[in-house]
Amino acid sequence: MRIHSHHLGATLSALLLGYQAQGKVLKDHPPLKFFVSISGSKFRDPSICDVAYKDPIKLKSVHFVGAKDWLKLRSEELASAFHNPLIIRHPQGHVVPRLDEEATRQLSDWTKGIIVEHGNGPVTSKAAET
């Protein structure tokens, strides 16, 4: 299972992932495989942050951060709550971004890594490699 969300969905999803990592929720649910955040942020309440983001969340994650997004700093802060996050920066604002060639390559490599890691074999089709 995976989670991908924009803004408030990303914020709530990251909170859920943090709580799951701490053993507070979804104890009988299989661990999630990856997380995609577009303009997500951390909750601000210290009583929530002290639990959800206590330790780095060990889950593959990619975070899209817009240069003109009013949540830019908060999105970067959320990314720092994850272990080894991929941060893809774009020149746009608070939107689902249009990716340039480099960002598309980064996202493609990240996605291929998840497919290989979770036993679905290597990506070999020409369509998947372009």
Image: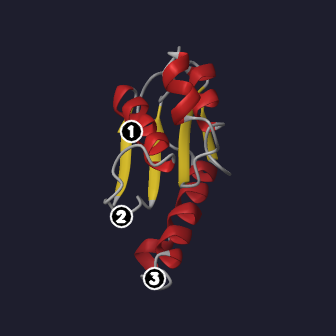
Mark 3 or 2: in front is 2
Q: Identify the disc placed on residue 119.
A: 3
Estimate the spatial distance between the alpha carbons at disc 1 and disc 3, rounded to whole Å: 25 Å
Q: Which residue is mark 2?
A: 30
Q: Secondary structure at mark 3?
A: loop
Estimate the spatial distance between the alpha carbons at disc 1 and disc 2, rounded to whole Å: 15 Å
Q: Is residue 74 left or right of residue 45?
A: right
Query: In the image, residue 29 lies at what x, y percent?
Result: 31, 59
Q: Secondary structure at mark 1?
A: helix
**Quadrant occupied by the N terminus:** bottom left
Q: Which residue is located at x 57 percent, y 61 percent?
A: 110
Q: Amino acid at mark 2?
A: Pro
Q: Which residue is located at x 46 percent, y 56 percent?
A: 34
Query: In the image, residue 112 lies at what x, y percent?
Result: 52, 70
Q: Which residue is mark 1?
A: 13
Q: Identify the disc placed on residue 104.
A: none
Q: Quadrant of residue 12?
A: top left
Q: Which residue is located at x 58 percent, y 35 percent?
A: 53
Does the image show residue 91? no
- Mark 1 nearby-residue class (10 Å; few <14, some 14–19, many ≥20): many
**Exactly how many numbered labels are in the figure?**
3
**Residues tagged 1 and 2 counted as in contact (Cβ below 8 A):** no
